[in-house]
Image (cartoon, grey):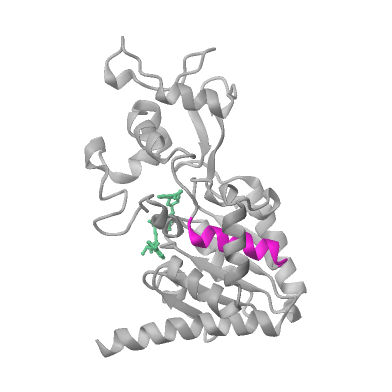
Amino acid sequence: MEFKKDFKKDSKMSIRKIAEHLQKHPRAKVIFVIGAGVSTACGIPDFRSPKTGLYHNLSKLNLPYAEAVFDIEYFKENPKPFYTLAKELYPGTFKPAKFHYLMKLFEDEGRLKRIYTQNIDTLERQASVGDEYIIEAHGSFASNHCIGCDKKFPIETFKEKLNEPKANLPLEFDYASCDACESLIKPNIVFFGEGLPEKFFETWDEDLEWLRKEVDEKHLVIVAGTSLTVYPFASLPSEVPSKTARALFNIGLVGDFKSDPRKSDLVFNGSSEDAAQCLIDELGWSEKFEKLINKV
Ligand code: CNA
């Protein structure tokens, strides 16, 4: 019990240190590295949280193993589980969380360098973060293609096809198919067995170079809401130059923060929403934050 209390105190202290750091170094910018945990507050389950995670709830889809829902070979054979999930996760259903708006506020304050997100929910875009700041490492619903002939469809068309009830077909054939060749239409979400977008690798290399070159500006990397288990994304924190401070806002210690912690790491062990609120308070950004929320 005592340990838990101290942990909470340490978490608050970490946020205070981040705020002090940003105030002391006004040219310092932040690179956010995020995952499904920042969107759980919006009602979107993550993958791996026990009891509430998607993998726990996939039994209704009759999958041979949970990850099959994002396996490209499995999708070709049985697209239904993915389409079922896609209907649930489709952009427009959920609203951004405090954490997403905080990242937008970092942009407005000129303190945002980049957001590397594993999320496919597009909530960074919905919080009005500029395109140039967002790297959707695992793709998103924003575009799609036919896996047979590569034809692209407007997102609205895909959405209609996804929701179109095919009354004359048995349920297992209720899938979004291409007008031209009748193959499956797949949003440009990176499945297991597919490569990540080139832009992800190129931008990360550029940003690493920028961190090394501008080491005196004391830029920061904040990792939030991810189990750091899906590679290559999971290796980003370990590649952060040793002279750049890293922070983790997560329920539980994960990845490199656990296996190879650095003395300078700042850890907030708790929800990213609490971390966001704490950081807003410590930075004295409450009023700006309220204004932003009322504007978007
Ligand atoms: P994950 O493996 O499910 O891990 C989530 C992590 O976040 C865990 O360590 C949790 O303890 C932690 N967590 C949960 N809730 C919170 C919270 N409120 N505050 C802080 N931490 C929290 O998810 P990852 O993102 O690491 O895994 C990568 C996969 C998940 C990517 O390929 C995504 O496409 C995929 N995914 C995305 C979404 C989405 O777009 N919102 C939802 C579910 C899965």
Return the residue nearer the eye: 108 or 69. 108
Residue found at x 59% / y 69% = 239
- Determine which quarter of the picture holds residue 4: bottom left
| Residue 82 percent across, percent down from the top left | 37, 34
In the depicted structure, whether residue 279 falls above or below residue 156: below
| Residue 14 percent across, percent down from the top left | 50, 82
Return the residue nearer the eye: 148 or 142. 142
Return the residue nearer the eye: 19 or 77. 19
Residue found at x 63% / y 63% = 105
Residue 223 in view here: yes
Extreme residue in the top direction? 168
Horizontal side of residue 85 vs 30, given as left or right: left
Give the prevailing secondary structure in the magenta stretch. Answer: helix
| Residue 42 percent across, percent down from the top left | 42, 53
Find out whether residue 109 is within the magenta segment: yes
Boundaries of the magenta span: 97-110
- Determine which quarter of the picture holds residue 209: bottom right
Q: Quadrant of the N terminus?
A: bottom left
- Determine which quarter of the picture holds residue 164: top left
| Residue 46 percent across, percent down from the top left | 37, 53
Residue found at x 56% / y 19% = 149
**Dividing the image into four equal quarters, which quarter contains ligand 1?**
bottom left
Extreme residue in the right direction? 213
Q: How many marks?
A: 0
Return the residue nearer the eye: 127 or 74. 127
